[in-house]
Each structure stands twice: as C-alpha cells, then as structure tokens.
Image (spheres, rainbow, N blue to C red):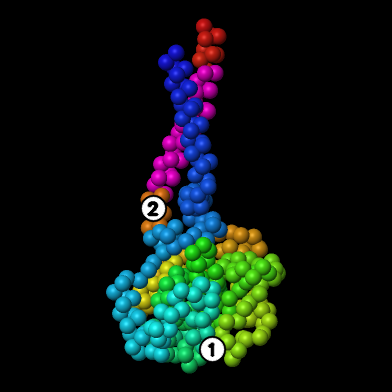
C-alpha cells in the first residue's frame, strides 16, 4: 500500500510540474531562457520585443552623474536648447522622434567621427559631417533627455535607433530622416522592417527631416541600404541608451562594449536568431531557476515514466520465474 501511495504521489507531482511548465510557456522571458538553455546561446524573436524592464540588467542606462555632466555641457556648448526638449517631452513618441530628427538637420558626409565626444559630434553633425553611427548616437542622447528609451541598431551597412513607446519598439533612422510604417500606418521595428524588405513586402518610409532634407520626396526604394537584401542578414542591437558611457568606453578601448547583442535573423529569408555575444547578467538568476526546474522535472519524469514501469515489468517477470 505504501509503495502504491508513493508511486501515485510521484505521478501527481509529475502532472503538477508539467502543468507549471505549460503555464510558464506563456512568458516570453522564460521561453527565451529555455531556448538559451536548450540551444546554447540562442534566443527567440520575442527577445527583440522585450521592454527595457524585461531586458533587465542587460539594458544599460547612463548614471545620473554622467547624464547631468553630459546634458549640462550640451546645453552650454551647443545649439541644443533645454527649453525646446522639455517642451516636446509630452508629445507621443513617434511624433517626438520626428521633431528630434528635424532638429538635427540634414544627413552627413558618411565619414565617421571616430574619437570625438558627444559635444563635437553634435556640432559636426549640424554641419553635415559624420556617418549614420554618429547621427544615431546624437539622436539617442537628445531623445534620452525627452524621456525616450532608445537602443542603437544596425545592419552590415547602416546605423539607426529603436524607441520603446511603452508597448513596443519602433525604428527611426536619424541619418536618412525616416520612420518606417507598414501598410496600415503602424510604425515598424527594425527587424519588422528588415523582414518585410527581405520578403519584398511593402514598407512606407515617412521622411521627417523636413522638405529640405536630401531624401525628402524620394521613394522608399531609393534609400541606399534598402536596396541590398544581403545587408539585412544581420542585426546588431546595443542594449541601452547610455551613449555617454559608451563614448567613454570607446575613448579608452578599441573593443566593442560587452553589452552588444548580435542577431542573425534573416539568413535564407527564414528567421534565425543567434545570440552570439552575451551579457549573462540578464539571465543568470532566471537561468538557474529554469535549469533547476528542468532537472527536477526530468528526474521525476524518468522516475515515474521510465524507472517505475521498468521496475514493475521486472518484478512481474521475476515473480513468474519463481
């Protein structure tokens, strides 16, 4: 009788753990960690949609000291006005992004301003100097003051910025002064846009740089980096709007910051997410919980669904021999 109760208890616990596992599958965060554990440094497409809060410690923000020092210098040494940025802080994110891009002016000359600090980059981009990376950094700093959460994204040719609007990320291109929309006028994320371009689906690029911008009035297909589908074979995401901190790191080391995430989503036009460079701070705690749960569940599964049936068969055969 005790043996039967023990076996029944194991089966019931097995069922409960299986139900917990099914319920846990509703969480994008847990799914991402499961995939990371199972497939060795792979993450799901859902990871790209996580809010800054769900991204945890992997989403970097500048320290208050860095921000205060940086913005005080910007408002003192450049033409950017604190009053103007404060005034547009309550405008919806898409419209606010457009106003910031318009404030920045025309695109640059394509030569990156390596080694320059943010003050120099702001001054030079105003005079059509710099590359898409410089424009993305300047935009992120200005947008950060207005309360926007940003992260820099790029493909093999071009840099842009994603903004979290409270529900989802959408892409902005400060260099070409455009924001992409789908055929229902919904703003697209960088990977959404890349997916549509790779599949020859419609992408509407709205020029927000003003009528004098060099790409104003031109069709979407004329934008240089959209013409090469191979350029979208990789997507790089800088997890944070800590441009002050990033520029400090770049000034003292040629190495990429450790919190760069690399994805390869569109090889052969099929989503393939490879998490190549990891910052384990984001998933260490959850990983331990998931791995422990998996080991417990696998152990109970083996005990109840493999070992016990084999033992039952063995005992029956043993009794027949007697």
In the rendered image, which residue does mark 1 sit on?
A: 106
Dot 2 or dot 1: first in sequence order is 1
Q: In this rendering, would 279 be left or right of 69? A: right
Mark drawn on residue 284: 2
Q: Nearer the viewer, mark 2 or mark 1?
A: 1
- In the image, is residue 292 part of the stretch drawn in magenta? yes
Front-lying residue, 286 or 110: 286
Q: In this rendering, would 267 be left or right of 42? A: right
Q: Quadrant of residue 211?
A: bottom right
The magenta span reads: 287-313
Q: Is residue 297 above or below residue 52?
A: above
Label 1, secondary structure: give it.
Answer: loop
Q: Is residue 229 above or below residue 17?
A: below
> Residue drawn at (51%, 42%), measured in percent from left and top?
23
Front-lying residue, 294 or 211: 211
Q: Is residue 86 visible?
A: yes
Q: Residues within 10 Å of mark 2 (few under 14, many from 20)?
A: few
Q: Quadrant of residue 181?
A: bottom right
């Amino acid at each position: 009788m005790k043996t039967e109760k023990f076996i029944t208890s194991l089966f019931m616990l097995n069922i409960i753990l299986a139900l917990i596992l099914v319920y846990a599958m509703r969480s994008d965060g847990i799914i991402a960690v499961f995939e990371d554990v199972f497939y060795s440094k792979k993450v799901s497409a859902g990871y790209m949609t996580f809010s800054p809060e769900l991204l945890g410690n992997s989403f970097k923000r500048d320290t208050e000291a860095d921000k205060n020092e940086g913005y005080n210098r910007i408002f003192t040494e450049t033409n950017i006005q604190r009053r103007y940025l404060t005034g547009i802080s309550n405008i919806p994110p898409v419209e606010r992004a457009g106003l910031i891009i318009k404030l920045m002016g025309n695109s640059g000359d394509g030569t990156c301003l390596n080694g320059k600090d943010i003050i120099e980059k702001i001054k030079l981009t105003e005079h059509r100097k710099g590359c898409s990376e410089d424009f993305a950094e300047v935009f992120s700093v200005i947008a950060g003051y207005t309360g926007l959460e940003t992260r820099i994204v790029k493909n093999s040719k071009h840099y842009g910025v994603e903004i979290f609007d409270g529900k989802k990320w959408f892409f902005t291109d400060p260099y070409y002064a455009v924001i992409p929309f789908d055929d229902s006028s919904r703003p697209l994320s960088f990977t959404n846009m890349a997916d549509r371009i790779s599949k020859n689906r419609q992408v509407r690029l709205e020029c927000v740089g003003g009528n004098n911008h060099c790409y104003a009035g031109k069709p979407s297909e004329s934008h240089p980096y959209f013409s090469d589908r191979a350029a979208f074979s990789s997507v790089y995401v800088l997890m944070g709007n800590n441009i002050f901190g990033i520029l400090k790191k770049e000034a003292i080391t040629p190495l990429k910051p450790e919190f760069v995430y690399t994805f390869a989503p569109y090889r052969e036009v099929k989503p393939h997410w490879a998490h190549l460079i990891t910052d384990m701070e984001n998933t260490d705690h959850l990983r331990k919980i998931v791995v422990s749960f998996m080991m417990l569940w696998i152990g109970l599964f083996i005990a109840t669904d493999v070992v016990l049936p084999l033992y039952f068969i063995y005992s029956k055969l043993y009794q027949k021999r007697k």
